[in-house]
Image (spheres, helix red, strand yellow):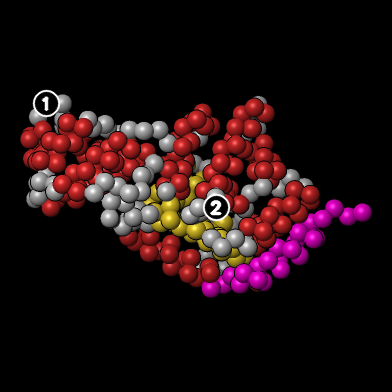
Amino acid sequence: MANANPAPTSVARKQVGMQLREAREKANLDLKDVVDEIGPGWSISKLGRIERGESGRISLPEVDLLAKILEMDEDAHANLIALVRQAASKSWWYKYRDVVHSGFRIYADMEACAQRLTMYNSNIVPGLLQTPEYARELDRIYFKNDPPTVLDRRLQLKLERQTFITRRTKPIAVQAILHEAAIRVQVGGPKVMEAQLEHLVEMSKRANINLRVVPFSAGHPLGTAVGSFTIIEMKPSGGLDQQPVVYFDSLVGAACLEDSDSIATHTKAIDSLRGAALDEVSTRTLLRQVGKNARPKG
């Protein structure tokens, strides 16, 4: 049957590629075999890009032809058509495309259709949990050449992202582990920090959010410094489970890791960090204490 959980554009494109690749391998065909059957306008490089979820459009007649060549059953064929149509549509962030850098676009799509986000942040409050004032101060510094109108659009983009975890119907589950440095490094002054920490307390009370802090006293739970990263678990699509993806961002660009070794390594790291973190109640106590200390004196 057709896909019951429509995926955002770039995610749908990856799912199209995955299903084509799996069907081709099941049919014991290589890329050249399929390209020779399709005919003019196709090449091994084009089909390879499509299977990797990269650029490349497929028309519905071509979908029908591919389904025939790959001997797909009726349900698989219908699901492929639904995904191809979804891949051709615009993502939720399209209206903000002028302020969404290319490396973040696929993450924004995956985040939107995530079932669970498991994140570790070493020195900054994650975007999904930032107050508008905290977020605006960071953007003001990082995008120092942007005029106020563009900074406003960046903030609106972030606030719209946050609705995925605050909506009343099926919000995304979030497990956020913050290092104590993330709640003590001051951003925007005492009032901004006090409000940000109180916001974290309130967000941690939501049923879909588990928030815990790794205290300074825990040392280095992994025996080395660890940068921020997010493990994205997406909803099943077309009756198929989706492989988790590890995402991280840096000054030189963003990356998504999908190989089993990277996923296992980061999952193990999360387990160790969770084991070293305060429980939820103690985390809220620490957040309130740090927030109180951040309060302006006098």
Q: Nearer the viewer, residue 97 or 122?
A: 97
The reply to whether callout 2 and callout 1 are in contact (CB within 8 Å) is no
- Asked whether 60 falls inside the magenta stretch, the response is no
The boundaries of the magenta stretch are 275-298
Check residue 174 in the rendering and tell me which mark sits there, or answer none: none
Q: Residue at label 1?
A: 40
At numbered mark 2, what does the secondary structure look like: helix, strand or loop? loop
Residue 202 rendering spot, x and y as whole percentages: 67, 58
**Other-residue count near label 2 (Cα within 10 Å), few / some / many at <14 / 14–19 / ≥20:** few
Residue depicted at 17% across the width and 31% down the height: 61
Residue depth check, mark 2 versus mark 1: number of the one nearer the observer: 2
What's the amino acid at mark 1? Pro
Residue depicted at 72% across the width and 57% down the height: 198
In the picture, measured across the screen, residue 10 lies left or right of residue 75, that is right
At numbered mark 1, what does the secondary structure look like: helix, strand or loop? loop
In the picture, measured across the screen, residue 297 lies left or right of residue 67, that is right
Residue 295 rendering spot, x and y as whole percentages: 82, 55
- Looking at the image, tell me whether mark 2 or mark 1 is earlier in sequence order: 1
- Asked whether 285 falls inside the magenta stretch, the response is yes
Q: Nearer the viewer, residue 141 or 295?
A: 295
Report the predominant secondary structure element of the magenta stretch: helix
Residue depicted at 50% across the width and 70% down the height: 272
Gap between marks 2 and 1 measured at Cα? 50 Å
**Other-residue count near label 1 (Cα within 10 Å), few / some / many at <14 / 14–19 / ≥20:** few
Residue 258 rendering spot, x and y as whole percentages: 35, 53
What's the amino acid at mark 2? Arg
Q: Residue at label 2?
A: 168
Q: Nearer the viewer, residue 269 or 76?
A: 76
